[in-house]
């Protein structure tokens, strides 16, 4: 029989080596560490009561070059300050997710309470911060042995504000005087985080490049947008405010709607499908907001880092994925334009915490995979919309190119069509199908009454016609227009957009009356040729020319009908063959430069 | 009992008799002569009983039947549609005193059957059955009516009447075949969707009718 066992719980004993293990996992770089300091500063402002306006939450980054006998130094300054109690209860604690909020019910950027500390510990030979609040100054930091503690004699050391500023070396800091005044009046404190002898940096600091990286870093981007972050180099102001990169949004995609994350998302693995919860009573449903840049982000430039989806928790970014890191993306080319953010608070549920220490990626698992797959689907949806728009734009470009050839074909047709029809069909006794010139026709023909609009004797043509914005009845020749390009003469300046189901050559009743034909550029074959070969390819020109042949044949048929010719198959076949032969012969003579 | 046909009906019968002789297109003058030969007392020139009336007595009925979709006319050449043939056969039976046709419920006249069969093969009808109403375009209306955008006003109206007549016959037949029911719905859908085009086409091109 098993003895009854009851464990008497004790505090964990943890060797400092564990900090090395965790710290190494951060794989720190300075552009990754500095945002951690910035976030800590912003959290200090957020905790202040009364609240401080965003524009007054000054964070100063000061980079001091290394010189002979002096190490390079990074500093991050805010005007809040801490007491030794804050340090003991919050700063000194490793891995406490409540540390950043200090027990307040405020949303802060700090997550696991590790980033800033680990950056100090891992990436500098020595580091400390000097903090001042309520007339007391403390210095706390890491020694060369990576062990932390207060500096001797600097734990809650009573100190005047001016003396504190002098000790911290920020008396003449390039910030608005009002900010310093607040400190001098005792209404605010300050903290100067100082890292001495930064890893891999000796002598001059490439601060501009570093700041450029910081402003693009997922953990800093949102803060940079809203808070005034000043850049100093050797104490001199070099940048009044670090500006976030503004991405110009693509026209037509300005206001893509937020997509709510479904309460349940499917997750399939090994043929088994689970449904994973993405909202409950404690965590509301999230949403995805996608945006489309005017220009592609590319792959190698700094701006390409914005080609990503930031995953947001309660506040701030808890992970960030470059678009090409999303699983199963299909619209790769279009995805290079897409960026956005996915607000998903349930990922921070402590029972199923998906947030990594360094907040770069989510902890891999079914929940994060299900979310990423869903995001990828939505990115593909937008990608398809971009692809469609691009195809439209290409088509418009192609159609513009084809317009000039259309004009050439119209002119060519006008020059010979009546002659050909007259020769082949034996005289246009009753006028062409599109009408002669109205009342000026001289009548005649094989029938006592012309059934077309006006008429002309023999091969003669009616006179008259006229000019104007709209074609008038009695127009001499049919006019061939291109759908989705040429303005509709009977519309409001817009072109006529036809369905792929409309015939390759199309007419409405009103077009018939005015002798207008539309070449349907939406026909699948037309679209395919334009897409694959372009408007200046011989294939497209051949297609375009054949539609003119269709129109001339139709005109011939209607003319035959109006002439009262008996339309037996044999007659129709012979006459159509004659018309086509004449058209081809004439095209060879006059259109060779364009067709061959 | 032998029923006396109207003058209009007699003109249609004259055309039918010529058509029955194998002439699919009949000249106007031939109709004039035939109707005069068959019914000389009613179709002679006023004051000249030995000469046929070539005017409105023959002309107008032919064009009225065209508007009903029973006659096709082009360049004063006339032919009968399936509906026209059915009507002419009915008139001939009446004239000969044959009994009325049996109850048409649960069966369709031949002309209506032809139209319904045609509808079944239309691409627009297939889209309609698939619930893709948004893909149906104006060309589907013309195809449904069996006309082109160039058809004259009266041909257009005639075909519209023919289809209305076929659909009415279908409704009266009481047939419940789902495809037949869908044909009726398709007819209503097209007439509603393209009401404006139909009205426009029915008004348009009056001048083109002259001499047609």
Image (cartoon, coloured by chain):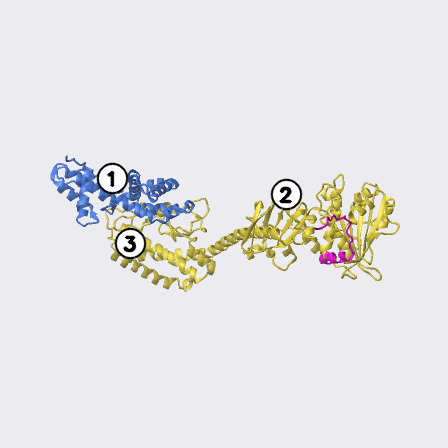
Which residue position holds label 3?
A459
Q: Nearer the viewer, residue A199 or A421?
A: A199
Q: Residues within 10 Å of mark 3 (few under 14, many from 20)?
A: some
* Majority secondary structure of magenta residues: loop
As for residue A14 lying within the magenta part, the answer is yes
Q: Quadrant of the C terminus of chain B?
A: top left
Q: Are callouts 1 and 2 both on one chain?
A: no
Residue A290, given in percent of the width and then of the height, sits at 59, 49
Q: Quadrant of residue A330?
A: bottom right
Judged from the image, the secondary structure of the residue bearing numbered disc 3 is loop
Q: Which chain is yellow?
A: A
Mark 2 belongs to chain: A
In the rendered image of this protein, which colour is used for chain B? blue
Residue A348 visible, this orientation: no
**Magenta part of the protein: which range?**
A1-30
Q: Are callouts 1 and 3 both on one chain?
A: no
Residue A486, given in percent of the width and then of the height, sits at 44, 50
As for residue A90 lying within the magenta part, the answer is no
Q: Which label was assigned to residue A448?
A: none
Q: Quadrant of residue A582?
A: bottom left
Q: Which label was assigned to residue A283?
A: 2
Mark 3 belongs to chain: A
């Amino acid at each position: 029989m098993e003895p009854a066992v009851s464990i008497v719980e004790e505090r964990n004993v943890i060797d400092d080596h564990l900090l090395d293990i965790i710290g190494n996992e951060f794989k720190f770089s300075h552009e990754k560490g500095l945002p951690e300091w910035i976030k800590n500063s912003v959290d200090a402002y957020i905790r202040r009561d009364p609240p401080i306006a965003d524009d007054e939450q000054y964070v100063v980054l000061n980079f001091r070059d290394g010189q002979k006998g002096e190490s390079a130094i990074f500093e991050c300054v805010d005007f809040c300050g801490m007491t030794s109690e804050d340090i003991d209860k919050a700063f000194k604690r490793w891995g406490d997710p409540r540390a950043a909020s200090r027990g307040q019910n405020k949303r802060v950027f700090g997550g696991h309470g590790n980033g800033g500390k680990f950056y100090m510990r891992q990436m500098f030979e020595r580091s400390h911060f000097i903090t001042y609040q309520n007339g007391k100054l403390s210095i706390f930091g890491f020694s060369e042995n990576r062990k932390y503690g207060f500096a001797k004699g600097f734990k809650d050391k009573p100190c005047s504000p001016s003396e504190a500023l002098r000790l911290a070396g920020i008396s003449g800091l390039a910030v608005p005087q009002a900010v310093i005044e607040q400190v001098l009046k005792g209404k605010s404190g300050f903290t100067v985080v100082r890292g001495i002898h930064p890893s891999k940096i000796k002598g001059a600091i490439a601060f501009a490049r570093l700041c450029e990286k910081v402003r693009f870093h997922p953990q800093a981007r949102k803060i940079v947008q809203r808070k005034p972050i000043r850049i100093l180099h050797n104490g001199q102001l070099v940048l009044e405010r670090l500006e976030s990169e503004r991405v110009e949004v693509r026209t037509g995609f300005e206001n893509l709607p937020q997509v709510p994350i479904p309460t349940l998302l499917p997750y399939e693995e090994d043929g088994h499908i689970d449904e994973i919860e993405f909202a409950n009573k404690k965590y509301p449903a999230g949403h995805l907001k996608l945006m489309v840049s005017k220009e592609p982000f590319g792959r190698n430039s700094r701006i390409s880092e914005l080609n990503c989806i930031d995953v947001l928790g309660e506040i701030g970014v808890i992970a960030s994925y470059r678009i090409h890191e999303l699983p199963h993306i299909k619209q790769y080319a279009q995805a290079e334009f897409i960026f956005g953010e996915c607000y998903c608070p349930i990922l921070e549920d402590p029972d199923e915490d998906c947030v990594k220490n360094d907040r770069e990626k989510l902890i891999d698992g079914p929940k994060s995979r299900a979310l990423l797959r869903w995001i990828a689907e939505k990115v593909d949806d937008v990608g398809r919309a971009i692809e469609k728009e691009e195809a439209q734009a290409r088509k418009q470009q192609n159609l513009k190119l084809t317009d000039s050839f259309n004009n050439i074909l119209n002119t060519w047709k006008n020059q010979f069509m009546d002659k050909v029809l007259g020769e082949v069909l034996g005289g246009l006794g009753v006028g062409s199908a599109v009408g002669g010139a109205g009342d000026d026709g001289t009548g005649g023909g094989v029938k006592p009454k012309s059934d077309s609009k006006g008429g002309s004797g023999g091969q003669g043509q009616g006179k008259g016609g006229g000019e104007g914005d709209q074609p008038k009845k009695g127009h001499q020749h049919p006019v061939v227009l291109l759908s989705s390009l040429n303005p509709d003469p009977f519309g409001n300046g817009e072109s006529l957009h036809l369905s792929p189901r409309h015939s390759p050559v199309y007419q409405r009743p009103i077009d018939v009356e005015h002798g207008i034909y539309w070449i349907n550029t939406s026909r699948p074959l037309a679209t395919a040729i334009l897409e694959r070969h372009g408007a200046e390819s011989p294939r497209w020109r051949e297609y375009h020319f054949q539609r003119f042949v269709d129109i001339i044949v139709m005109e011939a048929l209607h003319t035959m009908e109006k002439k009262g010719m008996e339309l037996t198959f044999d007659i129709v076949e012979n006459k159509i063959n004659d018309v086509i032969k004449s058209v081809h012969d004439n095209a060879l003579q006059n259109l060779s430069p364009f067709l061959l | 009992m032998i029923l006396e046909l109207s003058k209009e009906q007699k003109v249609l019968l004259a055309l039918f008799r010529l058509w029955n002789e194998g002439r699919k297109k009949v000249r106007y003058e031939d109709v004039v002569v035939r109707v005069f030969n068959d019914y000389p007392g009613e179709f002679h020139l006023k004051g000249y009983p030995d000469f046929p009336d070539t005017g409105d007595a023959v002309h107008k009925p032919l064009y009225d039947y065209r508007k009903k979709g029973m006659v096709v006319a082009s360049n004063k050449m006339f032919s009968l549609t399936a509906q026209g043939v059915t009507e002419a056969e009915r008139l001939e039976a009446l004239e000969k005193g044959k009994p009325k046709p049996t109850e048409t419920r649960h069966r369709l006249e031949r002309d209506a059957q032809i139209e319904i069969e045609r509808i079944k093969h239309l691409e627009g009808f297939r889209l309609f059955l698939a619930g893709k109403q948004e893909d149906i375009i104006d060309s589907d209306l013309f195809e449904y009516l069996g006309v082109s955008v160039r058809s004259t006003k009266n041909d257009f109206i005639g075909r519209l009447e023919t289809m209305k007549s076929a659909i009415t016959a279908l409704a009266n037949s009481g047939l419940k075949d789902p495809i037949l029911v869908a044909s009726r719905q398709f007819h209503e859908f097209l007439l509603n969707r393209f009401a404006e085009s139909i009205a426009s086409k029915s008004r348009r091109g009056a001048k083109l009718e002259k001499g047609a």
